Each structure stands twice: as C-alpha cells, then as structure tokens.
Image: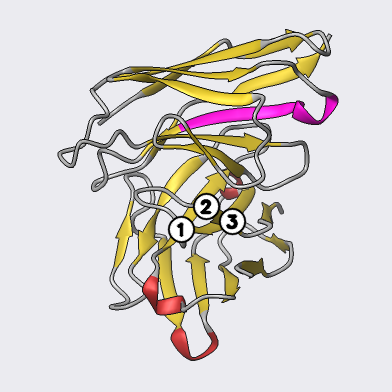
Amino acid sequence: DVVMTQSPLSLPVTLGQPASISCRSSQSLVYSDGNTYLNWFQQRPGQSPRRLIYKVSNRDSGVPDRFSGSGSGTDFTLKISRVEAEDVGVYYCMQGTHWPPRLTFGGGTKVEIK
Amino acid sequence: QVQLVQSGSELKKPGASVKVSCKASGYTFTSYAMNWVRQAPGQGLEWMGWINTNTGNPTYAQGFTGRFVFSLDTSVSTAYLQISSLKAEDTAVYYCATPVGATRDFDYWGQGTLVTVSS
C-alpha cells in the first residue's frame, strides 16, 4: 500500500508570511496515463474538506492564487505565499494514482496563526 | 449546483446499527461514484471505499469490511452507509464525496454526519 507522509504536523505562521507543507509518497505517483494524481485538501475548523489543488499544481475554481502546488514523483509541496486568517485549518494531501485498490490521505498539517 | 446533503447526527448504543444517507442533487447521480470518508474525533481523513452508482457494486477499503455496507436508492439519488454492531471506536464524522469534476479523487463533499457510539 502507498503511504503518504506529511510534514510538519503543525505549522504556526505569522499573518502575511509564507507557509510550506511537504507531502511524500512511498511510491511514485505517476500514473500510466502520464498524469500524477496528487491532490491537496483544506479543512477549516468545523467544516467539510475542500479540494484546493488537483494533479499536483492545478488550482480549483475559487481558490486564491496565493495557494500553489508543486512536485513530482514522490515529493510534493503546497505553498501559501502570504498566509491570511482564513487559511487556518488542516491541510491534507491525497493520492489517487494507486486506485484501485485505494485512495490514500496524508496525516494532515495543522496551520495556525502565531 | 452540485450538492450532497447528509442526514443528521446520530447517537447509538454499542451493538446497534446506524444508516447514514447522502442525497445528491445538481448532477446525474448514476454518472459518478460515491465515496465514503471517516474522520474520528481529532484525527485525519480515512477513505472507506466507494460504490459504483451505475452498477451498485461497492468496494471497501481495508478495515471497512464486514460491518460496513454501502448501498443506493437511485430513484431518489441517495447513497447510504450502514454500520452494524457499532463499537465506541466507530464514533466519527462520516462524509460522502463524489468526483463530478474530478478524476481519481473527489471535488464535492457532504457536510458530514456525526455518529456517536456510547452507552
């Protein structure tokens, strides 16, 4: 099974400063069609998760451009260029390449304001 | 617009059963799979599996076989998650999620249903 490992677990950030979250997979996430199915989700306190980024670097509609995704193979990064108060929450990476048999989430990174 | 509306919170005793519903609207229900995701209190997201809304064939992730059943009522565009022989460790928020505009993931989520198992 593919294991998704996120770091750090917790990320205190000053408002207006950048933030970076790492996600590593135990196997390459390049699919046979050439795409890499690595996605990022944001879960604000008390809310359902919301997809921010799909296939490594594509922002979903309505997602501010301060969010960006990058990476390849087994190493991926979500960056927030300037953290705002509304960005507080937990961020999860998720792989879809190795489905079936399964979709796999990372353990999550909690972003909070210093 | 795409919406997934789940049933309300449940409080159940150990050993009982619960059935969570997820009513879809704004798209053709049978064209996209329905996934289920569990989130235990203070914990991360765990994919439980999915059901093919066209054939009704369910697929369960490891750890969700036996007591967990996915089902459908396509006449009302609704997916169900039933959990039997409830245990305290089943206490969690359960989400349905569908890939209407997605490939190999999901871009629409329900609001979640809290199931609490306590004597």
Which is nearer the eye, A84 or A94?
A84
Q: Secondary structure at mark 2?
A: loop
- Amino acid type of the residue that numbered disc 1 sits on in the rendered structure: Gly
- Numbered mark located on residue B107 in the image: 2
Q: Is residue A65 above or below residue B101?
A: above
* Residue B25, quarter of picture: bottom right
Q: Where residue A26 appears, x then y in whole percent?
A: 28, 19
Which is nearer the eye, A82 or B103?
A82
Q: Where residue B57 appears, x then y in whole percent?
A: 28, 71
Q: Is residue A104 above or below residue B109?
A: above
Query: Can you say which quadrant of the picture contains the C terminus of chain A?
Result: top right
Q: Secondary structure at mark 3?
A: strand
Q: Who's the residue at 52% across and 57% down the image?
A: B97
The magenta span reads A85-93
Left or right: residue B53 compared with residue B114: left
Which residue bears the numbered disc 3?
Answer: B109
Residue A22 visible in the shown view: yes
Residue B86 visible in the shown view: no
Q: Distance between the Cα atoms at labels 1 and 2?
A: 7 Å
Which residue bears the numbered disc 1?
Answer: B101
Q: Is residue B45 magenta?
A: no
Q: Distance between the Cα atoms at labels 2 and 3?
A: 7 Å
Of mark 1 and mark 2, the one earlier in the sequence is: 1
Mark 2 crowd level (few <14, some 14–19, many ≥20, 10 Å Cα): many
Q: Is residue A103 above or below residue A25?
A: below
Q: Residue furthest bottom?
A: B75
Of mark 1 and mark 3, the one earlier in the sequence is: 1
